[in-house]
Amino acid sequence: MPATILSIEDQPDIRRLIRMTLEFKGYTVLEAGDGQEGLRMAREQKPDLILLDVMMPGISGLDVSRTLASDPRLQSIPVVMLSALGASTDIEAGLTTGARCYLVKPFSPWELLDMVAKLLSEATAAR
């Protein structure tokens, strides 16, 4: 059964790129356009991995990641932060929320696929 990945991204073009990249490798992709919708979908669907934009209207990706990390039912789901903010302080801020990785936009589709495969493999091994 293919892994399910939740993409929480407010930019439709980036969501589409992520979906097409992941579907190319056979993953099931769920999409949310903002943090509130993303949290709801994470609670309802319990995806295998979450890709999370940092800068979104309403709830920021940093706050979404903190919320996921504090929820015992969701804290084991690996989170990858995606952001155009690439300074070391931005990356550190993302990782201190509980996210496992931080990818700076623009990123290569191959880089995304490699990171997703690595995190899913680690999560499977930890079960």
Image (cartoon, rainbow, N blue to C red):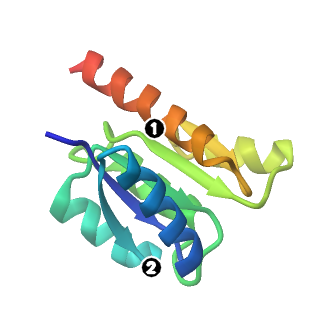
Residue 7 got which mark? none
* Type of amino acid at the residue the image marks with label 2: Gly
Query: Would you call the spot at circle 1 few (<14 residues within 10 Å), some (14-19), or many (20 or more)?
Result: many
Q: Position of residue 78 (x, y in %)?
A: 40, 39
Question: In this picture, is 107 found above or below 117?
Answer: below
Q: Mark 1 points at which residue?
A: 116
Q: Which of 101 and 67 is in front in this view?
A: 101
For the C terminus, give its image quadrant.
top left
Report the mark closest to the observer, 2 or 1.
1
- Splitting the image into 4 quarters, where does residue 88 fall? top right
Query: Residue at 42% across / 31% down in the picture?
Result: 117
Q: What element carries label 2?
A: loop
Q: Position of residue 90 (x, y in %)?
A: 77, 51
Q: Nearer the viewer, residue 98 or 2?
A: 2
Q: Position of residue 28 (x, y in %)?
A: 26, 54
Query: Residue at 55% across / 46% down in the picture?
Result: 97
